[in-house]
Amino acid sequence: MPRTVKIGLIQASNACDTGEKLDIIREANVNKHLELIEKAASEGVQMLCMQEIFTGPYFCAEQSARWFDSVERIPDGPTTQLMMQLAKKHRMVIVVPLYEEDTTGVYYNTAAVIDADGKYLGKYRKNHIPHCAPGFWEKFYFKPGNLGYPVFDTMYGKVGVYICYDRHFPEGARALGLGGAEIVFNPSATVAGLSEYLWKLEQPAHAVANAYFIAAINRVGVEAPWNIGEFYGQSYICDPRGQMVAMASRDHDELITAEVDLDKIREVRNTWQFFRDRRPDSYGELVAP
């Protein structure tokens, strides 16, 4: 019997004015996603992921201490607790990208992973943090991740998470493959311009190099008052041969879904023996300072 799982990805525009109170912004964005989560449940989605820091705008377009107050605890914060209830209700694995508070003043760009029985499995903290113009001032907000590259053994398959800028670094993508990941989710916030052509290049390459599925999510729209560019959507699901099996639009709030066969991983790895033919004994310079 094929090991099939139905994946869903939600891409969305920011739900309200960025000048609103932070609790109103969070509530508006969560409520927008609740409708799409219910739609995913009605379509039989078994694994679901939202975009990077889905509870608000991409506030890293500016450097303002105001946004420090939008952090949440994981798993005790309100959004993770809500998603645990929904995961249990719908028998759905949910990857929940949030701005996480560890301790006061120590914050991370994080994704919580919740199993289909509502159990919190753990979290991934974004390891690679950009800080560059125009409008990607992430080191102001996030400490680099300190949890490595965990793989979560869910009811439907083994899940890894990579977040946005991480996708430019093949080392973590390889670590997830070696850790047993079958599906790697990459929630993102990326705008048209310099790196857009890489959106459909790098992650399919990771999928091929490691023979796993990639599920990449990007937000949509232009966010005022910063207007750093168009978040161009085009969320997609890619198979271990680097072939797109589903892709969203460029500019619409959207749920995309695809049913994938995890047995394809074995088939591809038996054809392309990249893991067998690795030479870790010769890679020491890759981790030299």
Image: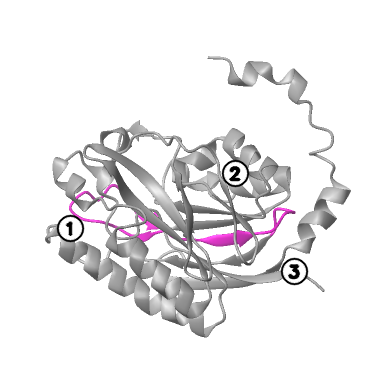
Q: Is tag 3's residue or tag 1's residue first in the polypeptide sequence?
A: 3
The amino acid type, in three-letter code, at marker 3 is Arg
Q: Residues within 10 Å of mark 1 (few under 14, many from 20)?
A: some
Residue in the picture at 23% in, 63% down: 26
Residue 202, disc: 2
Give the magenta-colored segment's residue range. 219-243
Contact (Cβ within 8 Å) of mark 2 with mark 1: no
> Which of label 3 and label 1 is nearer to you?
3
Q: Estimate the x, y position of residue 258 in percent, counting from the top left.
A: 62, 71
Q: Residues within 10 Å of mark 2 (few under 14, many from 20)?
A: some
Determine whether 136 is above or below 30 in the image. Answer: above
The amino acid type, in three-letter code, at marker 1 is Thr
Cα gap from disc 2 to disc 1, whole angstroms: 31 Å
Q: Estimate the x, y position of residue 67 in percent, counting from the top left.
A: 19, 47
Residue in the picture at 26% in, 44% down: 61
- Please name the predominant secondary structure of the magenta segment in the image: loop
Q: Is residue 17 visible?
A: no
Frontmost residue, 219 versus 232: 219
Q: Which residue is mark 1?
A: 18
Residue in the picture at 52% in, 72% down: 92
Q: Is residue 220 visible?
A: yes
Contact (Cβ within 8 Å) of mark 3 with mark 1: no
Q: Which residue is mark 3?
A: 3
Q: Is residue 81 magenta?
A: no
Callout 2: SS: helix
Cα gap from disc 2 to disc 3, whole angstroms: 26 Å
